[in-house]
Image (spheres, rainbow, N blue to C red):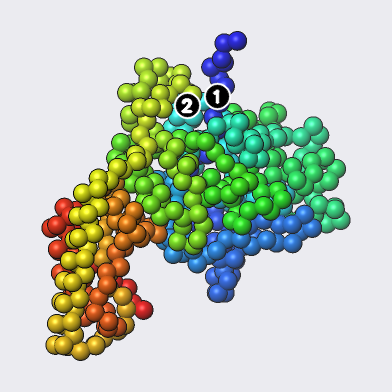
Amino acid sequence: MKKRKDLTEWIIHFVHERKIENEPSFFLCDFESEDYHSFPDNFTYEGKPIYQTEQSQEEEYGLEEDASPFCVLKKILHDGTIKTGWSFRKGIPTIYGPKSASCFTEMPLYALIEYSKSRNVDKLVNTYGIAFIKEEIFDAGARPVIYGLSGKHKEAKTGDSFFGIGLRNLAEECGIGLKEMYRYVYTNISRQKRIDWTHEREWRWADLERKFWDPGLPFFSKTDLISFSKIIILVNTTDEVSQIIKLLQNLHHSGGTNYGTPYDLNLIENSYILSLEELKNLTTDQDNVKFEDLPLKKIPKIKKIIVKQETYDLVKKVILEAEKINYNATEKKYKELGDIGPCGFANIVTYDTNSEITQALIDLEIAHSFAKGEYIIYLKGYPIQSISVQEFGTKEAAIFLTEKLGQRFYPHSRLD
């Protein structure tokens, strides 16, 4: 049977720019309170709110209030989770029922590109996203949405058994249970007050049984409950491809987030980065191209870095010498100034993710990474607490490492 042009074997999560005014904390919480960010990520089926978002982690990452789609995409990859939400529009949630949801579309690549360009006028959609194999996202629990009802749309009010279980519910008489209500999309394709989103071919995912700690679909976050064989990360430019490769390599080296969540390293290794700028070099039929038509072997992904034995030997030798330089320079300055100023830690960092030197530092457990793009080297040094005195040693050691290992190293300090 010939494959249909309008169907695809892939599902994509589109990434849009951050709009703080569409986040519930912006208009529903008290900014005077210390807990103004707290807002239910989900509800139990009895209506009890469930709080899952760790706001300290959100603030530590530091995503800007008006972050671009590309920056939002990088945060999603870092977190390893496509966060569920209530899809607020003008202060009104568009997800019904007690469970928040992540949204996807099964439009083919060619249709998705054209649609995203037309929708990008109002900045609701952009050509950044993460594509999953449809069978795998189905096995993970995602389902097509339900467009409209057999009868009239009616929302739950006081006295209805569904009222108050979540932010916005359909009335019980509509016939959609609480577990399936997240899939409902209000639809009216009659002549009056037309509301029609059927062309989006939307799918949604929700954590219906509270299986996961974080509020969202884990893909890079390693779990025994869900797994994916490969994904395609969609960006606009060749330069963005390079940035994502560096990010993925750093995540792979880190092994998990700074908060202790391990990554699925196999999936990171099988993450392809597709640039729309380079799409013309992959196919001559851009008007009909689908994800399954793409030659994956020609699409970039992270590469295994092979380290030669002489590189390991060089790194070990140079690090020992750097530690002596660090120790001696710090001791000299300590005898001159004493243990002055605030306490802290002075170390060395490099930001080269794809070098043989960095891979050797990781393999030898000399450098450590925490999914922040940097590789920290904790050199043995003179035993003092003064951060300003320690920095004299790390500055000299960083210069030495840069000269001997052929990539940039920098002093790195933090207060105790």
| Residue 396 appears in the rendering | yes
Q: CA–CA distance between discs 1 and 2? A: 8 Å
Query: What residue does disc 1 label?
Result: 8
Residue that mark 2 sits on: 291
Vertical arrangement, residue 11 with respect to residue 219, above or below:
above
Q: Position of 280 compared to 65: left or right?
A: left
Residue 241: image x %, image y %? 34, 39
Q: Observer-nearest residue: 384 or 106?
A: 384
Judge whether 190 appears above or below 288 on screen. below
The mark found on residue 171 in the picture is: none
Residue at image point 46% right, 55% down: 256
Asked whether the viewer can see residue 128, the reply is no
In which quadrant is the N terminus drawn?
top right
Crowdedness near tag 2: few (<14), some (14–19) or many (≥20) residues, C-alpha within 10 Å: many
On screen, 270 above or below 157?
above
Kindly state the secondary structure of the residue where label 1 is placed.
Answer: loop
Label 1–label 2 contact, CB within 8 A: yes
- Taking the image as shown, residue 245 lies to the left or right of residue 135, namely left
**Residue 52 location, quadrant:** bottom right
Q: Position of residue 343 (x, y in %)?
A: 31, 82
Amino acid of disc 2: Phe
Residue 32 drawn at (x, y percent): 55, 74
69 left or right of 4? left
